[in-house]
Image (tube, rainbow, N blue to C red):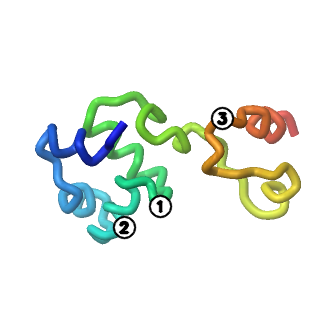
Amino acid sequence: MNVKALLEKNNISVAEIARQCQVSRSFASLVVHGHKVSRPIAKHIESLLGFEPGSLFPYVLKPIIRGRKAREVGYDPFDFNNSSIASQTQSK
């Protein structure tokens, strides 16, 4: 889904999201267009538009894995189809 189009349809500007989330307009725009990942901003946008968490930004529902463990299991935060990684990390 085109998040920017949904925001425009609901008369919500990227600048307004940036103000509400206390980030720069450019960073909010990068999140809207999928070039940056930010769970708080993504969750805020989904709630403003009335969507369930993870429906517009699937990474919101993925587990947060950092450091050595992420490298060991081959974690890719942008691979939304690989649910086996999530099950591997939750079982340990």
Residue 63 coordinates in the image, percent (x, y): 66, 43
Choose between 46 and 5: the one closer to the eye: 5
Q: Estimate how packed mark 3 is, as few (under 14), some (14 to 19) or many (20 or more) residues with alpha carbons within 10 Å.
A: few
Q: What amino acid type should be assigned to the residue bearing mark 1?
A: Lys
Instruction: Give the alpha-carbon distance from disc 2 to disc 1, as whole Å.
Output: 8 Å
Q: Residue at x 27, y 68 (%)?
A: 25
Do the numbered discs 3 and 1 sit on residues whose CB atoms are within 8 Å?
no
Give SS at disc 3.
loop
Residue drawn where x is 38% and y is 62% of the image: 30
Per the image, the residue denoted by label 3 is: 81
Asked which quadrant contains residue 45, the reply is top left
Q: Do the residues labelled 2 and 1 touch (CB within 8 Å)?
A: yes
Left/right placement of residue 69 relative to residue 53 reads right
Query: Disc 2 and disc 3: Cα gap in Å?
Result: 26 Å
Q: How far apart are marks 3 and 1 (CA)?
A: 19 Å
The residue type indicated by label 3 comes to Asn
Up-down relation of residue 58 to residue 12 (above or below): above
Instruction: Give the amino acid type for the residue marked by disc 2 in the picture.
Output: Phe
Mark 2 vs 3, N-terminal side: 2
Q: Is residue 64 left or right of residue 37?
A: right
Residue, disc 1 = 36
**Mark positioned earlier in the residue sequence (2 or 1):** 2
Which quadrant: the N terminus?
Answer: top left
- The image quarter containing residue 92 is top right
Sequence-first disc among 3 and 1: 1
Where does label 2 land, which residue?
Answer: 27
Judge left or right: residue 6 versus residue 58. left
- Nearer to me, 9 or 70: 9
Closer to us: mark 2 or mark 3? 3
